[in-house]
Amino acid sequence: MENPTTVVALLAARLTALLRSDDGMSTVEYAVGLVAAAAFAGLLIVIVNGAGVLDALTGLIERALAPATG
């Protein structure tokens, strides 16, 4: 899993690239889109760093790597 700082940096780079093209969007739409994307990224970081998600992913990986019985 990537470092949350790396994920945010990649998101910021992608948004910067998208913002350079102004095909049909106004400055206000850019601002609203940027705020929404940043909020969504923050929410994803909080969710992915939660103990429940970590436990679920660990269990999934352990089951996938366990020898088959039966």
Image: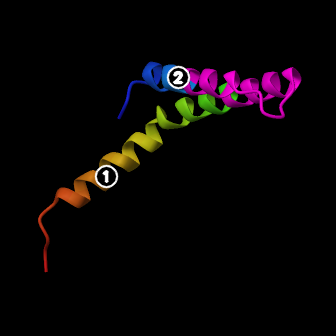
Q: Nearer the viewer, residue 55 or 15?
A: 15
- At 62% from the left edge and 20% from the top edge, which residue is drawn? 16
Q: From this view, report whether residue 12 is shown above or below residue 50.
A: above
State which quadrant residue 63 falls in.
bottom left
| Residue type, numbered disc 1 | Gly
Magenta stretch prevailing secondary structure: helix
Percent position of residue 17, x then y? 60, 24
Percent position of residue 67, x then y? 11, 65
Residue 8 image label: 2
Question: What segment carries the magenta color?
Answer: 12-37
Q: From this view, report whether residue 63 is shown above or below residue 21.
A: below
**The magenta stretch spans residue 67:** no
Percent position of residue 66, x then y? 16, 60
* Residue that mark 1 sits on: 59
Q: Nearer the viewer, residue 27 or 6?
A: 27
Where, quadrant-wise, is the C terminus in this rendering?
bottom left
Q: Does residue 14 appear left or right of residue 55 in this picture?
A: right
Query: Which element is circle 1 on?
Result: helix
N-terminal-most mark, 1 or 2: 2
Query: Which element is circle 2 on?
Result: helix
